[in-house]
Image (spheres, grey):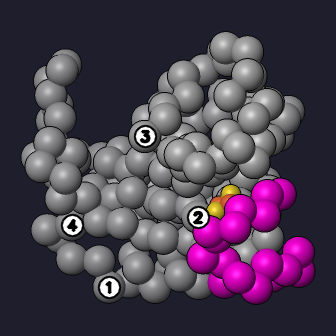
Amino acid sequence: MDNYPKYKMGQWIKEWREHEAHNLTFIVTEDCNLRCKYCYVTHKADNARMKFDTAKKFIDYIFDIKTPDQHAVVLDFIGGEPMLEVELIDQICDYFKYKAFLLNDEWYWNYRISICTNGINYDSKEVQNFIYKNYLKLKVNFIVHIMYLDPIFPQLLLYPPHPFPLEIL
Ligand code: SF4
């Protein structure tokens, strides 16, 4: 662990400050619990989910080709509705952390998780467990594309406050 950069309290590495972190995007499912008219996923299917083995091979490949100037990374999960596959996301994140630790790679410290979700199952036990597990260690962004949702799913806007912050962009 001696080759890790030294941090001072309140300091961010340059990649976070200047939005230069690398982005690994996982399309974990093509299914969704909504059917928005404007949706770009026109071929939704509940059996179209990423296999854990595929994600694992992708992570192995990325670590194989990673160069020393790549200091930070965002694990980006999209769909369809990625939170339908939160257990798979959890498995992928665990594997990423395990691999980075084994390789003594700085990404073990310098990673974030981004999930672009419609928020429908935000209250589920599985999603809350995932947030709880990752919340204190890293910044979890929930990007809810709520812009056109209210006429379609008005109750989403009436959800009570949550124990964890929900970031709406
Ligand atoms: S929530 Fe997103 S993925 Fe689901 S139907 Fe709407 S636009 Fe498509």
Which stretch is magenta? 33-54
Which quadrant of the view contains residue 80? bottom right
Number of numbered markers: 4
Disc 2, SS: strand
Distance from disc 1 to disc 3, alpha carbons, whole Å, reads 33 Å
- The residue labelled by disc 1 is 65
- The residue labelled by disc 2 is 78
- Type of amino acid at the residue the image marks with label 3: Leu
- Type of amino acid at the residue the image marks with label 2: Ile
Residue 58 picture location, percent across and down = 53, 82
Residue 169: which disc? Answer: 3
Residue 91 picture location, percent across and down = 71, 58
Residue at 71% across, 43% down? 151
Distance from disc 3 to disc 2, alpha carbons, whole Å, reads 15 Å
Residue at 29% across, 77% down? 66
Residue 152 picture location, percent across and down = 75, 48
Q: Is residue 165 visible?
A: yes
- Of circles 1 and 2, the one toward us is 2
As drawn, is 73 to the left or to the right of 38? left
Q: Is residue 52 magenta?
A: yes
Q: Nearer the viewer, residue 43 or 6?
A: 43
Comes first in the chain, label 1 or label 2 = 1
Comes first in the chain, label 1 or label 4 = 1
Residue 43: which disc? Answer: none
| Quadrant for the C terminus in the image | top left
- The residue labelled by disc 4 is 70
